[in-house]
Amino acid sequence: MSATLHVKVWRGGADGAFQEFEVPRRESQTVLDVVTHIQRALDPTLAYRYACRVGMCGSCAMTVNGAARWTCRTHVDKVANKGELTIAPLRNLPVIRDLVTDMREFFDKWARAAGQFRGARTRADDFARVSPQSAERVQADAAIECIGCAVCYASCDVLARLPEYLGPAALNRAWTLVNDVRDAAQAERLRAVAGDAGSLSCHTHMSCTERCPKNISPTAGIAGLKRAVARAALAGEL
Amino acid sequence: MSARSETLLWVAQRASAGLLALCVTVHLATILYAVQGGLTGAEILGRTRGNPAWAAFYTMFVLAAAVHAPIGLRTVLAEWFGWRGRARDFALIAFAVVLAGLGLRAVSTVFA
Ligand code: FES
């Protein structure tokens, strides 16, 4: 382990440039530790986001040596290349400043993919009983742990070509709801994920699945949506 | 285009892809088998002319290609060149008709 890390950090907006820093190497150091050291010790004007530091909140994702990662759970050991780190904002999102991106479009797409739960029961009704072993619940469980970090969104090649594509996270969310037997807006949801920018635009490159820090497979969910949407279209229900 | 039409196009492309996988395999296997020991144009026509089973097979092949290729191009035109909308779709229908026309003409010459 060399004593210092050579770190290039993106500064400015879309037309910014990399700035170089030397950061002391420490044991069990994460990429977020490196960025925090720069901000606290070397340049207090550096803008970046984090909150929980334990992989729950999804706010700390950045592009590290070319790949999107959650930086609070990424050890420098795993990603540094000969003592060098290049840290940039996430791709496919507008850069506000330094390592901070504008995530509005990312979250708006969850709404556009009908990502809200729409129940039909009232408080007068009994609890819905969903067996943990039921096929739908098992499918939803596999996709439900998303923390909204946008690593998948930044890794998606389709989005780079088709900016209006809903993207892996929003479609993964829709897939959990398609498998929610209590939800009463299924037809509307399938319509939302069937259009020009929906699930059918996925080219199955699987970058999202490869990069998801929670080991979710949005690709599998999107494939499920494609089948559901195709079935509905053939049945004239779309 | 409506979500339903988009989806039906997608289904048509998957279905035609399945047919094409079968057709291309049979087509290549037949060529490899038939060219053993050399081949002339007259020999080919001797075998293909008046054979309704092969004529039907190649008609299906041509139609599957005429469905499959334009739908794929539709996505390529949107993603690479940002070309969407009615004009693109009409251009692609014309392309499908040309593909089907050329293909069916070839089928009728070789098999009729
Ligand atoms: S800081 Fe919360 S997930 Fe990394």
Image (tube, coloured by chain):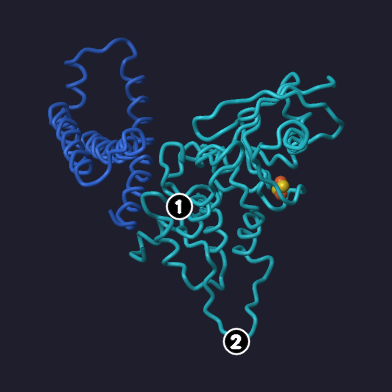
The image position of residue A10, as x and y in percent, is: 60, 30
To which chain does the residue with label 2 belong? A
Question: Which image quarter: residue B95?
Answer: top left
Q: Position of residue B16 (x, y in %)?
A: 33, 42
The residue indicated by pointer 1 is A226
Q: Is residue B104 left or right of residue A70?
A: left
Sequence order check: which comes first, mark 1 or mark 2?
Answer: 2
Chain letter for the part of the structure drawn in cyan: A
Most extreme residue toward the top is B38
Badge 1 local density, few (<14 within 10 Å), some, or many (20+)? many
Q: Is residue A212 left or right of residue A103?
A: right
Q: Residues within 10 Å of mark 2 (few under 14, many from 20)?
A: few
Q: In the depicted view, which residue is nearer to us: A139 or A87?
A: A87
Q: Which chain is tinted blue?
A: B
Residue B43 sits above or below residue A15 on the image: above
Residue B18 lies in quadrant? top left
Position of A99 compared to B48: left or right? right
Local SS, label 2 = loop
Label 1 amino acid?
Lys
Q: Secondary structure at mark 1?
A: helix
Q: Kindly identify which residue carries mark 2.
A: A125
Q: CA distance from mark 1 to mark 2?
A: 33 Å
Q: Which chain is indicated by disc 1?
A: A
Which of the two marks, 1 or 2, is nearer to us in this view?
2
Residue B76 placement, left or right of A151: left
- Residue at 57% x, 39% y: name it: A97
